[in-house]
Image (spheres, grey):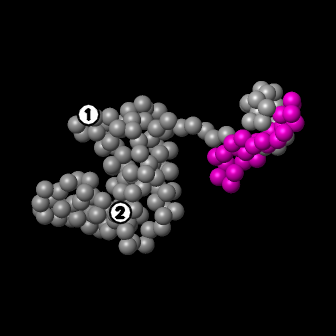
Amino acid sequence: MKCPYCGHLENKVVDSRLNKEFTITRRRRSCESCTQRFTTYERLEVTMPMLVKKDDRREAWDRLKVVNGLKKACEKRPVSMAKIEEFVDTIEMKLQDMGEREIPSKIVGEYLMNGLREMDEVAYVRFASVYRQFKDLNEFMEELKGMLGGQEK
């Protein structure tokens, strides 16, 4: 690590600490040349797979886009932002665990649909109406019937 004060490359770690979520390591360092202290932060760099869209386009994973879509579906519903963030974290972990470089966006859509169905039924219906691109009221009613039929079991 290069000293930000004198540019010397040799330094020693004086103190290391993890943040509350155990995702970032904070290190206090001391330069062996000028003895100035400085702080560095280490974070694991995670690469998300590319999403393969219906028309075979490739698109980078965009967490913000997913969060915004879920926020819109959960608007005026009793679903906290923390719950949405936690849900997206879970989706990201699932995608990383797959170990693939490319994943069909349909898989992500299904993960989102299944999670929303458990989280809030109204948000699920809102999201489904956009995601499934219902052509008419009959398709929408079929989805609702399927959802209601699943509850009776």
State whether residue 149 appears in this view: no
Marks 2 and 1, how far apart in space? 26 Å
Residue drawn at (54%, 38%) of the image: 46
State whether residue 50 appears in this view: yes
Vertical arrangement, residue 2 with respect to residue 126, above or below? above
Image coordinates for residue 112, horizontal then vertical, percent: 37, 53
Helix, strand or loop for disc 1: loop
Which residues are the magenta region?
17-41
Query: Which quadrant is home to the N terminus?
Result: top right
Q: Does residue 93 appear left or right of residue 40 in this picture?
A: left
- Give 99 or 31, whichever is nearer the viewer: 31
Q: Which mark is residue 144?
A: none
- Give 40 or 66, whichever is nearer the viewer: 40
The three-letter amino acid code for the residue at tag 1 is: Asp
Query: Which quadrant is home to the C terminus?
Result: bottom left
- Give 38 or 93, whichever is nearer the viewer: 38
- Name the residue beneath numbered marker 1: 56
Image coordinates for residue 38, horizontal then vertical, percent: 78, 42
Residue 70 in which image quadrant: bottom left
The three-letter amino acid code for the residue at tag 2 is: Lys
Q: Does residue 137 appear left or right of residue 86 in this picture?
A: left
Helix, strand or loop for disc 2: helix
Q: Is residue 20 magenta?
A: yes
Few, some or many residues within 10 Å of mark 2 (<14, 14–19, 20+)? some
Residue 12 in which image quadrant: top right
Vertical arrangement, residue 17 with respect to residue 116, above or below? above
Vertical arrangement, residue 33 with respect to residue 65, above or below? above
- Name the residue beneath numbered marker 2: 72
